[in-house]
């Protein structure tokens, strides 16, 4: 899927939303040449009958073909015609057909993987695109009342899948795309849409008598990003493309979202819905690192089904994540990070009633937060599949430092928090056999822990002897804190390899 999404996804979007900038004059021939060159850089072969007359270049029977790659994916796009017409003021109007089919085939090389074939119909209404600038620096301004992609045919392992509907659309679209350079093309894009909607209603591939139905959408969608694409680079070889200068940096946001689904088949069913207030996702990839961050607020989720004993309802104030990690081989340690937040997670009283019918446990919303940063040196380019296969069984890098910026676990009235710093000696793999020697400390605080143990014993969920064992363990690793039912602990690893808990030697 990774290569499929990079090649087909990036190239297909480029066909409809590509562009470039500066203020001078461009001709129809120059825009067509730039358009074609850009698509070829994404791995498409471009063929068609070209005609030029009176400031207009028209290409009929245009086909864009992408040969099968290492992932077994191939694709082609057909257009009856596309035209580039000079407006007389140094600009060019681009006209695309209202509909065009995109045919794809996926034959994954993995043993037992299903072969998938299909046709996606692209359609648009009210589409306008104007190109301005100079040959080396063009700007595409575009808009449309609607753009849509509809799956019209799907064959899985030779068996056609019944499709009632499978469509994704965007409405009230406005955007701008700027492209400059030749050896290294720099494309900067912005786009907005008032809504993105999708609907899927197809036969269940595992049981043709069942159905898979999904609907949903996003409101006030916005996108902004920049891509750098070297000339004559093979986008299926991501390690080489990144080394040549390929990079992407961008993200999208929306103000509200919702979805519903229902799956039936093999005598069972599951259904549910979800909604959110707002969300965003940002991404960055270059020859040095890869960075993803995402956040969604005001989340609600509801599920029910034949194998779910009672309806499940979950809400949370915020769900967020971040990942930063080096991907290119480095001589010196570089930054990495990992974070996860699930804030104010609440479940329905029906779920609480299954484990606590008498209401003895505090039903405060739960929170999980982890925020880690550090330094690591990568010894194998993780984007180089061949190098990673040859190095199978050995770690692709070395960890040099780790900081626990935040650690929070709050549930049923108890709350654990912590933070700390560690460094690692990768030349010492014997003090702690098989791993680099750590040095540093982690500080922890637990509040409400004893009260939670008491309640679990009173409810009969925890035997008294196990609760006593837990208290003894806490006594070994912790000491009383400043407040009621509060415990603190400092876990320290010294330079000489000792492990201490509040100064007491454990190793």
Image (cartoon, rainbow, N blue to C red):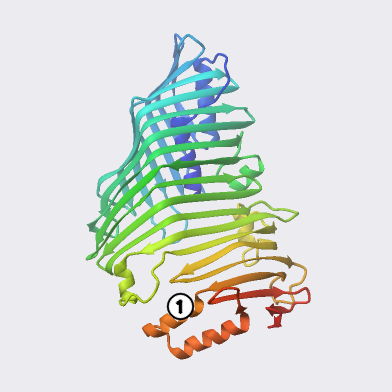
**Is 366 on the left-hand or right-hand side of 209?**
right
Q: Quadrant of residue 62?
A: top left
Q: Residue furthest bottom?
A: 465
| Residue at x 22%, y 66% (from the top left corner) | 267
> Above or below — where is 329 with respect to 423?
above
Where's residue 57, x and y in %? 45, 16
The reply to whether residue 464 is in sight is: yes
Q: Quadrant of residue 120?
A: top left
Q: Residues within 10 Å of mark 1 (few under 14, many from 20)?
A: some
> Above or below — where is 77 with respect to 498?
above
Q: Secondary structure at mark 1?
A: helix
| Residue at x 71%, y 76% (from the top left corner) | 432
> Above or below — where is 2 with respect to 456?
above
Where's residue 23, x and y in %? 57, 17
Where's residue 315, x and y in %? 37, 58
Q: If the image is split into quadrants, where does the C terminus sit?
A: bottom right
Q: Which residue is mark 1?
A: 452
**Is 276 on the left-hand or right-hand side of 428?**
left
**Is 350 on the left-hand or right-hand side of 1?**
left
Q: Residue furthest front?
A: 483
| Residue at x 44%, y 50% (from the top left corner) | 296
Where's residue 331, x and y in %? 75, 54
The reply to whether residue 59 is in sight is: no
């Amino acid at each position: 899927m990774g290569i499929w999404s990079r090649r087909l996804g990036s190239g297909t979007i480029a066909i409809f939303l590509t562009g470039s900038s500066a203020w001078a004059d461009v001709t129809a021939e120059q825009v067509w040449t730039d358009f074609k060159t850009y698509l070829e850089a994404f791995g498409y072969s471009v063929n068609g009958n070209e005609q030029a007359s009176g400031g207009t270049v028209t290409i009929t029977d245009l086909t864009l073909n992408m040969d099968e790659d290492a992932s077994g994916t191939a694709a082609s796009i057909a257009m009856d015609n596309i035209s580039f017409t000079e407006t007389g003021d140094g600009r060019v109007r681009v006209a695309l057909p209202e509909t065009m089919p995109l045919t794809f085939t996926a034959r994954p090389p993995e043993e037992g993987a299903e072969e998938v074939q299909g046709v996606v119909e692209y359609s648009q209404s009210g589409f306008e695109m104007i190109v301005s600038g100079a040959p080396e620096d063009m700007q595409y301004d575009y808009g449309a009342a609607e753009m849509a992609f509809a799956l019209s045919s799907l064959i899985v392992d030779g068996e056609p899948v019944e499709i009632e509907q499978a469509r994704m659309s965007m409405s009230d679209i406005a955007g701008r795309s700027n492209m400059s350079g030749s050896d290294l093309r720099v494309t900067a894009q912005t786009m907005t849409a008032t809504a993105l909607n999708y609907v899927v209603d197809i036969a269940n591939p595992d049981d043709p008598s069942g159905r898979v139905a999904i609907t949903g959408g996003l409101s006030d969608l916005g996108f902004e990003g920049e891509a750098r694409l070297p000339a004559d680079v093979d986008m299926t070889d991501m390690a080489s493309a990144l080394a040549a200068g390929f990079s992407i940096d961008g993200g999208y946001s929306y103000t509200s979202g919702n979805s519903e689904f229902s799956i039936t088949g093999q005598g069972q069913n599951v259904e549910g819905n979800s909604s959110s207030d707002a969300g965003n996702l940002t991404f960055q990839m270059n020859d040095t690192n890869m960075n993803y961050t995402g956040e969604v607020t005001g989340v609600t989720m509801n599920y029910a089904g034949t194998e779910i004993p009672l309806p499940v309802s979950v809400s949370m104030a915020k769900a967020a994540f971040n990942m930063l990690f080096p991907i290119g081989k480095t001589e010196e340690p570089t930054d990495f990070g990992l974070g996860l937040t699930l804030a104010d997670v609440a479940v329905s009283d029906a779920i609480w009633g299954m484990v606590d019918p008498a209401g003895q446990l505090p039903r405060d919303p739960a929170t999980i937060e982890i925020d880690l940063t550090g330094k690591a040196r990568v010894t194998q380019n993780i984007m180089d599949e061949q190098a990673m296969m040859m190095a199978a069984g050995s770690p692709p890098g070395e960890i040099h430092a780790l900081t626990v910026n935040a650690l929070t676990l709050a549930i049923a009235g108890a709350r654990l928090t912590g933070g700390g710093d560690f460094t690692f000696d990768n030349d010492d793999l014997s003090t702690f056999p098989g791993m680099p020697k750590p040095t540093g400390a982690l500080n922890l605080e637990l509040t409400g822990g004893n009260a939670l143990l008491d309640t679990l014993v009173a409810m009969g969920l925890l035997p008294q002897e196990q609760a006593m064992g837990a208290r003894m363990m806490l006594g070994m690793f912790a000491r009383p804190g400043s407040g009621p039912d509060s415990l603190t602990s400092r876990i320290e690893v010294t330079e000489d390899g000792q492990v201490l808990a509040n100064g007491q030697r454990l190793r």
